[in-house]
Amino acid sequence: MKHVSMKTIVSATLLLLFILPSCAQVSSKNDIGVQNTTTLTYTDTATLANGCFWCTEAIFEQLKGVVKVTSGYMGGQTPNPTYETVSSGTTGYAECLQIIYDTTIISYDELLEVFWETHDPTTLNRQGADVGTQYRSAVFYHNASQQSKAIHYKNELNTSGVYAKPVVTEITKASRFYPAEDYHQSYYRNNTNAPYCRAVITPKIDKFRKVFKSKLKE
């Protein structure tokens, strides 16, 4: 895909459907793991930040070709961040997803398409009612190809006239990824009937599934 597709250059109205109210704050002891690895030679890694990872994880894990999604933190300097410290907005870390995907089924371009269509990339350090640098829009690239594609599509979006404001998505080299505490992983699947999930995440998932019906796992 050499140019931004029609699905990427969508109206701001459609994109604003995905903006979320604030994530509930839940306390837990630190349970940091290690960075995800895989032995499958046809897989690659993408790291994306587009708001509360409870919601974004629930989106990306439904895509065909996505092998594993891990919620976590990237972009800060202090070792071993916790949800509580990241939530302060002073650590430099962003809530993000580490996505292992099958390159024979889904491309990095397609992941970027979903990324930009499921949040508002024009709001600096904010998604809906979630405010702080930890909720910033960011692409953490792992190689030159990912960097080039992210810059290309960001520029296309900024020149397309889709938005009244410029896209402020940060594009920066991936640093160490810290998986979030266990209770954050598969949060939506494990808490589907919780009030927050029913009120906030389920409606977002329903809208996402309508837009990306052809890309969903069976």
Image (tube, grey):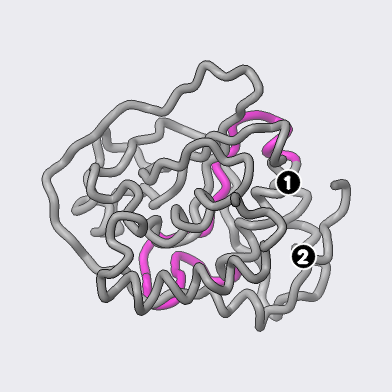
Q: Nearer the viewer, residue 121 or 196?
A: 196
Residue that numbered label 1 is attached to: 109
* Residue 174 higher or lower than 206, as above or below: above
Residue 178 showing in the rendered view:
yes
What numbered label is drawn on residue 176? none
CB contact under 8 Å: marks 2 and 1: no
Amino acid found under the numbered disc labelled 1 = Asp
Q: Is residue 162 left or right of residue 123?
A: right
Q: CA distance from mark 2 to mark 1?
A: 12 Å
Magenta includes 145? yes
Q: Residue furthest right?
A: 2
Residue drawn at (57%, 38%), measured in percent from left and top? Answer: 46
Residue 45 picture location, percent across and down: 56, 32
Q: Is residue 3 left or right of residue 21?
A: right
What numbered label is drawn on residue 7? 2
Q: Which stretch did the figure color magenta? A: 121-148
Q: Earlier in the sequence, mark 2 or mark 1?
A: 2
Residue 174 picture location, percent across and down: 51, 35
Residue 133 showing in the rendered view:
no
Q: Secondary structure at mark 2?
A: loop
